[in-house]
Amino acid sequence: MEAQHTPISPRLTSLQQQMLSGNTAALLAFWQEMTRQGAPLIETIGGDEKHALVTFLWKANGDTHNVVIWGGPAGLDHPEEHQMTRLLQTDLWYKTYRLQTDLRGVYTFSINDALAGPAQGGFGTRFLPDPLNPKQFVAHRDEEKPDSQEVIFSILELPHAPAQPWIEPHPNGDKGQLYAHRLRSQILDNERRIWVYTPAEYTEMSKPYRLLLLFDGWTYLDLIPTPTILDNLIREGRIPPLVAVFLDHPDDETRNSELACHQPFIDFLVQELMPWIHEQYHVTAEATQTIVGGCSYGGLAAAFAGLRASNTFGNVLSQSGSFWWEKDPEDDIQQEWIIQQFIESPRLPLRFSLEVGLKEDMGWIYMVGCNRHLRDVLRLKGYEVQYAEFNGYHHSVSHRGSLADRLVALVSKEPASGAKDEAWNRPPASGRNQKQSIVSQLMSTFTPE
């Protein structure tokens, strides 16, 4: 007789025991319960408030021989290690993870895929969201990009994940306006879309508005509902009314070139984009009231823009900045080129709000380490820096919630959602321009907080 696998989940262990005892109705009752409450199944661990058992479930229809979890705690490689197990000879497939209760991420299921990599024409052809999970994250198709398509993820959101109170439209709140433009760059020899958000009751009779410039404009409109976030923050008085510019890139190849510490892109921002913005909209020319920001490569580009154009951009907002980047990578070792530039440069009139997810390390790329490294370098140089870590992955499902905290930090220095951000550090009262032994000090300060 084949040995039975005992589930880690107490609920599934009980279900299996009931079925082995002859209770044929137990499985139907279980599926009815899961349909009502939704998946995944989350169970507490006695005496451990920081962790829970999270069980992903799949109800098989027809000939199912392989179910794999993709994303979230399963990561994005080694699918063979994240196959689900079939309970007895039923239609129930499952896999359980022990996870921290403040985790947020996304996942999908792969059904009957070969476990070979996509390059071999195998795994990665049949991704499906979790039909038992009503929480979905949708990446819509960009009509101007022929190769793009709609992708639907299921959201993994554990009980103590940080609240995201600013991402839903307020039914009675005033709403700003979003305008679409196109701008041709002589410096870069290309054209791009630009969207501009103006707050409710925008007027040119007021003093010039603060300015927020975000790279990867489509991401900050489709995946991160930034206009809604701004509407809510402004309505509640958490930030003053401001104008936001969402800068697109012609294609992915161009994006990866422009955002990777590319000086011609900075020249475009300063010499072409900013004059165009000031001509079209009533915005400030003060660097201290101008924020440049982005996610991933966009965070890297924001830091580079601050470094090379601090007279234009006085505030840097980075969500999971790719500070590991190196101009000439060698042997898959991150060289952190931008951090070296800040070490070697004099202190500039810049303020920073940085964040990174604790689950973002991928292969040889240590996202957490390079963000902590930049934080420490900036503080040792005397910059004002606010830094936060969230328990999540390199995905907009987390960034859409924490963007409000980054904005409020740079405008009012108060957290927007009660997240456990570090307090602002203060530059030393004297000797701010003195050269410091950065490397020796980092040996004692490069620690997680």
Image: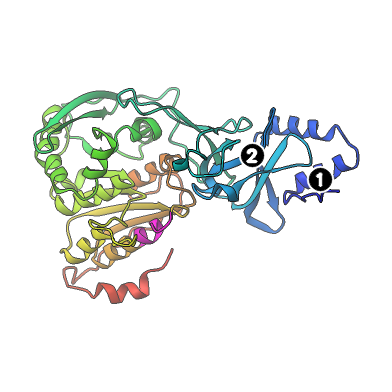
The residue labelled by disc 2 is 66
In the image, what residue occupies the spot 29% across and 25% down? 200
| Mark 1, other Cα within 10 Å: few <14 / some 14–19 / many ≥20 | some
Q: CA distance from mark 2 to mark 1?
A: 24 Å
Report helix, strand or loop for mark 1: helix
In the image, what residue occupies the spot 51% across and 48% down? 75
In the image, what residue occupies the spot 21% across and 61% down? 342
Q: Is residue 269 left or right of residue 373?
A: left
Residue 369: x percent and y percent? Answer: 38, 61
Residue 374: x percent and y percent? Answer: 30, 61
Picture disc at residue 97: none
Specify start and end residues of the magenta stretch as a single range.
362-372
Residue 212 visible, this orientation: no
Verify whether residue 215 appears in magenta. no
Residue 220 visible, this orientation: yes
**Quadrant of the image occupied by residue 94:** top right
| Mark 2, other Cα within 10 Å: few <14 / some 14–19 / many ≥20 | some
Residue 102: x percent and y percent? Answer: 55, 50
Q: Is residue 20 left or right of residue 383?
A: right
The residue labelled by disc 1 is 14
- 352, above or below 220, in the image: below
- Residue type at mark 1: give it: Ser
**Quadrant of the image occupied by residue 147:** top left
- 410, above or below 444, in the image: above
Classify the position of the C terminus by image quarter. bottom left
In the image, what residue occupies the spot 34% across and 24% down? 175
Q: Residue furthest right?
A: 22
**Front-lying residue, 184 or 427:** 184
- 402, above or below 218, in the image: below
Q: Mark 2 or mark 1: which is in front?
A: 2
- Residue type at mark 2: give it: Asn
